[in-house]
Amino acid sequence: MEHRLRAARVATYVYFVLCGTLMGAWVVHIPAVESRVGIGHAALGGLLVLLGLGAFAGMRAAGSLTDRLGARTVVPASGALCAASLVLPGLAPDPWTLAGALLVFGFANGCLDVGMNAHAVRVEQAYGRPVMSGFHATFSVGGVIAAGAAAAAAATGLGPAATLALLGAAGLAVALLAARSLLPGTAAPADAPAAPSEAPDAPDAPADGGARRRIRVLAVLALMVMLSEGAANDWSALHLKDVLGAPASTAAFAYGTYAAAMTVGRLLADRFAARHGAVAVLRYGAATAALGITVAALTPWVWAAFLGWALFGLGLSGCVPQLFSAAGHADPAAAGANVSRVAGLGYLGMLAGPAVIGWLTHLTALNHAFLLLTLLCGTAAGSAGVLRAAARPATTTDRVPAPAGGGTP
């Protein structure tokens, strides 16, 4: 049992890295694909919406499929499809074929995203303690791998299509080889530790109607948090450059500071959740994010803006993993469907974040538009109690032993 759980956990890490690598490989090749197809930024923006719509459709489809067929079937299949379709954008000769390629790639990526998160919930249930944030941290590792591979390929003279084909072939092999270590079936292993509620006096799980309402609340919270993440992705560097007048070379570090803080936070969040509970992770994390973005929005100093973006990333780091985990634990028999609902709405928020902030800049200054994120993060912090109603992995106060040898990531 111990060996199987450890192998399943490692395999889950592998799929998170794979997902990050495949998406990162597409992202770093966007300029080359744009040039090959001969389109401008405006047309590319419209095509990227299709990528998001494909991902949303894949998330919705993968939820019910994971509950019926099991993650051991859905995760490697979607991983293989995602890897195989990676080369399609690099081969597209015109905008229409690029649109179709992005729809297929987005669909496969959405399926993989939900399937691996649903399996991560099962692993977390089996361990009897929080491990979800560690999985999300490794997604960022994939982006680093993709950037390094693209740089190495460019140095050797490989074109975008050849690079995407090679990365896709490697990803296909990884997706199939790691499948054997995934947990079988659609429920937690019978001999795994039970996943008790967050506290001994936590209320009983609500009836189906209450569970559905809770999933809706979790989905709305994911929308708020991931909208904030999406805004940071696209506007952090521009904030330093356009608002504070920092040189472009300095402004670029705004996003790097945010991303680095988020990665560190996710590596630490599981330990914090095990000691203090999921509610504390969301409450104090979202409150820290609200403080950070407020500092970034209102400060006239570049160094303070860096501090604000770092606090923003650190605070947001553990929020999404806890929301996904709570959705999966709310009803183990429908973990895939519930994760897909929360992840799907959250993903729409991430896509909408840059556009919402951009629209607000027609009404106010960019830094003042960031105060919307303060409101969203503050609302998430105030709503953290919804996580109490979900069945959670054991905390240190529950004294449920973890499998021997399984350390925190």
Image: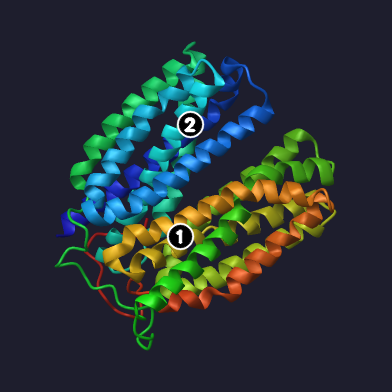
Give the crowd class for mark 1: few <14, some 14-19, many >=20 residues within 10 Å.
many
Q: Which mark is residue 342?
A: 1
Q: Label 2 amino acid? A: Leu
Residue 80 visible to the viewer: yes
Q: Label 1 amino acid? A: Val
Task: Identify which residue, 301 or 241, lies in the foreground.
Answer: 241
Q: The C terminus is located in which quarter?
A: bottom left
Task: Identify which residue, 100 or 249, lies in the foreground.
Answer: 100
Residue drawn at (57%, 50%) of the image = 350
Task: Identify which residue, 209 or 137, lies in the foreground.
Answer: 209
- Mark 2 near mark 1, Cβ–Cβ under 8 Å? no
Q: How many marks?
A: 2
Question: Above or below — where is 78 with respect to 220?
Answer: above
Can you name the residue that lies furthest to the top here?
157
Residue drawn at (34%, 80%) of the image = 207
Q: Position of residue 144 (x, y in %)?
A: 49, 36
Q: Position of residue 87 (x, y in %)?
A: 41, 23
Considering only order in the chain, which callout, 1 or 2, is on the residue closer to the N terminus?
2
Colour setting? rainbow
Q: The N terminus is located in which quarter?
A: bottom left
Task: Identify which residue, 81 or 261, lies in the foreground.
Answer: 81
Q: Secondary structure at mark 2?
A: helix
Q: Position of residue 267 (x, y in %)?
A: 45, 56
**Rounded to the nearest whole Å, what is the CA distance between mark 2 and mark 1?**
23 Å
Residue drawn at (51%, 78%) of the image = 385
**Does residue 396 appear to the left or right of 348 in the view shown?**
left
Q: Secondary structure at mark 1?
A: helix
Q: Which residue is mark 2?
A: 102
**Does residue 139 appear to the left or right of 310 in the view shown?**
left
